[in-house]
Image (tube, rainbow, N blue to C red):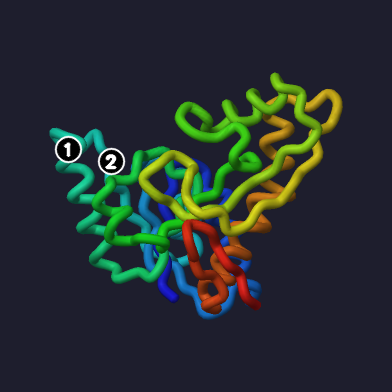
Amino acid sequence: MKIAVCVSGGGTNLQAIIDKIESGEIHNTEIAVVISNNKNAYALERAAKAGIEGVCISPKDYASRAEFNKAFLDKLNSYNVDLVVLAGFLVVIPEEMIRQYRNRIINIHPSLIPSFCGTGYYGLKVHEGALARGVKVTGATCHFVDEGTDTGPIILQKAVEVLDGDTPEVLQRRVMEEAEWVIMPRAIDLIARGCVTVVDGKTVITE
C-alpha cells in the first residue's frame, strides 16, 4: 500500500509511522510522499532523513483557495496513493478530494470523539477544553475523513488518564505518547491488511 502523509508541523506522528514501517509493525506499506503546507515544518526534515520525498504546497503561494486546492489535489493524485494520512495537517481538506478519496483519508484527533472535537478544537485547544471541563479520561481517535469536521467513521480510539496538575502541554504529550503514536500506525496497518471496511457509516474491523 502506498500512502501520502500530510503534515503542518513537527511531524511526531509521521515519525511514529516511519519507525513502525521500519520495524515491521506496519505491514506492506510505503510512504510515497510527505506533503506539508508549511515549508518550515520539521516534518519535512524527518522525511528527508528517512529518504522519503517531501513537498511543500502552501496556500500563500496561490491567489485563491480554489487554486491551492487544485494544485494540492493534482500533486497528491500524481503519486497514485492508496491512503492519505493526515498527521497534524491544519488545512481544510477540499470537498473534491474527500469525494475522490472516500474512506481513503484518515485523521488523528487528540480526544475521544465526540468529545472536544469539531470546529475550533485543534492542537492545544483540545486539551485546554478537556482540562477546563474536568474530565478524568481523554485520549485520541483515528477516523476516516468526511465532509464534516471530525465526523467521519471512527477506526480506533484509545483512552488516556488525566492526572491532577496536568497542563495542556503535559496532557498533549501524554496523549501523543500513549494514544496517537499507537493507534495511528495500527490503523494504517489494519487498512493495509484489508481489515477495515465501512458499513452504514461505521467501521467494521476483522482480523
Q: Position of residue 67 (x, y in %)?
A: 15, 42
Residue type at mark 2: give it: Ser
Provide the secondary structure element on which disc 1 rests: loop
**Residue depicted at 70% across the width and 19% down the height:** 132
**Residue depicted at 57% across the width and 53% down the height:** 142
Please name the residue that numbered disc 1 is placed on: 62
Identify the disc placed on residue 89. Answer: none
Q: Quadrant of residue 163?
A: top right
Q: Is the residue under label 1 in contact with that under label 2 (CB below 8 Å)?
A: yes
**Residue depicted at 29% across the width and 56% down the height:** 99
Q: Is residue 13 left or right of residue 119?
A: right
Label 2 to label 1: alpha-carbon separation:
8 Å
Q: Is residue 6 left or right of residue 77?
A: right
Identify the disc placed on residue 58. Answer: 2
Q: Position of residue 180 (x, y in %)?
A: 64, 50
Q: Position of residue 76 (x, y in %)?
A: 28, 59
**Residue depicted at 50% across the width and 75% down the height:** 29
1, 198: nearer the viewer: 198
Residue type at mark 1: give it: Tyr
Provide the secondary structure element on which disc 2 rests: loop
Within 10 Å of the Cα at label 1, are there few (<14), some (14-19), or many (20+) other Cα atoms?
few
